[in-house]
Amino acid sequence: MPAQPGLTPEASDLDLLRAHAAGDRGAFAELFQRHRDRLWAVALRTVGDREEAADALQDAMLSAHRAAARFRGDAAVTTWLHRIVVNACLDRIRRRQAHPTVPLPDGGRAEDGDRATGGVEPVAPARDHDTALVVRQALAELPVEQRAALVLVDVQGYPVAEVARILGVAEGTVKSRCARGRARLAIMLGHLRPTTGAGRPAAPDVPAVTGGNPQPAEGVGSASGLSRQDAIGEEP
């Protein structure tokens, strides 16, 4: 079905979402195409498993597809989409913790699953691959709330204020979760820190909690305030 009259490639995210709610079958696909790479990266790094991340992203997009008509515009469409994705990821993590399995190590190479989700994760150089796996495994051991905050702030570079809107919590809560998560990672990854000339590990390098990236991440709006009722699924 062709796009609704008046919709152009320059149509805003909100225009596309409203067109989808009004019955345009192509509008939501266009919206997803715009933001799929960042949504995929958030899902993959939050869940830590490629197949689970793909399933979580699919669940999230189905939820967003169905809930579009209820979007009130209190925040940017991208904030709304990210929140749905994070909630879907956290739901899957909690279900996995309730019914633990032994997942295969997840490499960094792009496979057919990436094309299915539209996401691409950069491939680490061979010499850094083992370190990347260790860091990912350590991240996966963090409590889910700390992991989600760190992925959004430290890995994806979102400002703390934006992460607070995505997660539906106060900025201070985001900072606290990041601080606790960084402290845990500093302990788990201490063996990766460079050593001094005497062979002793250098002093722990736990970054101080800041306001995050001073510039909004590309494609992420900075609209003020997100009603907690905008959340889809369980709150982080």
Image (cartoon, rainbow, N blue to C red):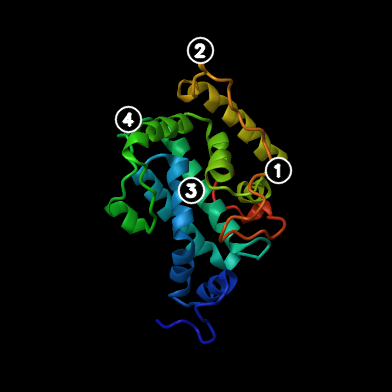
The residue closer to the viewer here, 166 or 101, is 166
- Per the model, the C-alpha gap separating discs 1 and 4 is 35 Å
- Amino acid of disc 4: Val
- Amino acid of disc 1: Glu
x and y percent of residue 172 in the render? 72, 39
* Marks 1 & 2, CB-CB < 8 Å contact: no
Q: State left or right for residue 7 relative to residue 122.
A: right
The residue closer to the viewer here, 23 or 220, is 220
Q: Nearer the viewer, mark 1 or mark 4?
A: 1
The disc at residue 171 is 1
- Amino acid of disc 2: Ala
**Residue at the spot x=53%, y=21% of the render?**
187
x and y percent of residue 24 in the render? 47, 77
Residue 118 seen in the figure? yes
**Residue at the spot x=49%, y=61% of the render?**
35
- Amino acid of disc 3: Val
Q: Residues within 10 Å of mark 3 (few under 14, many from 20)?
A: many
x and y percent of residue 53 in the render? 40, 46
First of labels 2, 4 by sequence position: 4
- Per the model, the C-alpha gap separating discs 1 and 3 is 19 Å
